[in-house]
Amino acid sequence: MSTPQAEPSFRQSVDLMFNRAAALMDLSPGLEQKIRVCNSTYTVRFGVRLRGQMQTFTGYRSVHSEHMEPVKGGIRYSLAVNQDEVEALAALMSYKCALVEAPFGGSKGGLCIDPRAWDEDELEQITRRFAYELIKRDLIDPSQNVPAPDMGTGEREMAWIADQYARMNTSDINARACVTGKPLNFGGISGRVEATGRGIQYALREFFRHPEDVAAAGLAGSLDGKRVIVQGLGNVGYHAAKFLQAEDGARIIGVVEHDGGIFCDTGIDIEALRNWILRHGGVKGFADGEFIENGAKLLEADCDILIPAALEGVINLSNAQKVQAPLIIEAANGPITSGADQILRAKGTVIIPDLYANAGGVTVSYFEWVKNLGHIRFGRLQRRQEEARHQLVIDELDRLSVALGDAWSLSPGFKEKYLRGADELELVRSGLDDTMRTAYQAMREVWHARADVEDLRTAGFIVAIEKIAASYRSKGL
């Protein structure tokens, strides 16, 4: 989607949003500047011999803030990757990690490549060479810089990077902690693949626990029955839509993809649509809904909740005034430009911002990093001990049941549910849920306590900036 000429760049939008929050804080000019600027960006141009000739690729790894180390942030593969975008994403990672109290600074990486243009063997060669260039400069390291998947990458690429690091650091016992988002059989963690989408669900659940906030968006009640439009049915959008539909009763009425959109007011079967996209490469031809050739028009359709879950800048000066959704949750990074954000706020739209909403990925990445450093699966030590303690309670309840006869009995299925100790997936979900609740409460406290804070984004930036500033102050800066 083309953006208007007057639109600030993604990097400028992030800075403008930072400035709006910083203007309401008591920061020294020097500390404010230190937090805002990107510490460093490394650009690498490397060659790989493919298809009988040398192919040259350009990649980036940007470090925004080292107030905590290691720094953390994904690696994306896209032809749109450039230094400006990578630095903006690194900045968002700093604020995101600070807001959800993940002990990382912010970083981001990218390779200017269309991953669909190369077969798997070629992509592995390219990935390993890119990793080599970063590893030898300590830009991938368990204690200094820890990448993760992003747009165009996934478990496969992270496994290649982790293996490349291990080959170059044969004595590093913590080698697998050099990246997160790995396959389960290669040091990954249960729940990481769907973590960002699950985080969107938990963020919305927490929002709807506060009737005052729901009313601010002109809504009422719970998530049940809410009409939702999702832009982008990739990993994040798919899992968010799937969980909201299956577990919270939300009605997914629209999906926007690269080749158009699908609309159905009675609700779309997300699993069926996802399978169609995987088989056919797009939504066109899907029978159970109306095909909208200009899919972006669905961003302006009447709905309760809009979830932009793909690219930055999809809601900008050209369409912000037409957006009807009273509640927008940013599943993607930077889907709303600074100018559009101003228009939407003036209309009364409530925006749950990206630095909070899509933090599920880095939160579960944090859990994976801790798992790799601890060299033990979560739940392995305590699960059976929990079950043994619960058995004592069940035995006592059974004794009482015999003594009281028909006057008292346990509910059907209670024993099985109560006896089962938490496995890794349940512990990950519990930790993610707690993180999303706590971070939202920190934002809303600022939002409601200060008359000069008009929106959740500004509140989130204030919370994050203050945490980063406190880290720098403790270092004597």
Image (cartoon, grey):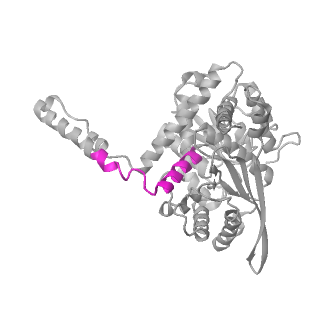
Residue at the spot x=19%, y=33% of the render? 409
- Figure label count: 0
Q: State which quarter of the image contains the C terminus.
A: top right
Specify whether residue 152 is in view.
Answer: yes
Q: Residue furthest bottom?
A: 52
Q: Is residue 144 above or below residue 175?
A: above
User: Which residue is the extreme one toward the right?
Assistant: 5
The residue that appears at 56% across and 50% down in the rendered structure is 365
- Considering depth in this image, is 254 or 370 the residue closer to the camera? 370
Q: Is residue 374 magenta?
A: yes
The region drawn magenta spans 360-387
Magenta region includes residue 163:
no
Whether residue 246 sits left or right of residue 216 in the image: it is left
Q: Position of residue 167 (x, y in %)?
A: 59, 71
On the image, the x and y values in percent for residue 220 come to 56, 24
- Residue 260 horizontal/vertical position (percent): 71, 50
Q: Is residue 330 visible?
A: no
Q: Is residue 37 above or below residue 348?
A: below
In this rendering, would 17 be left or right of 309?
right
| Type of secondary structure dominating the magenta stretch | helix
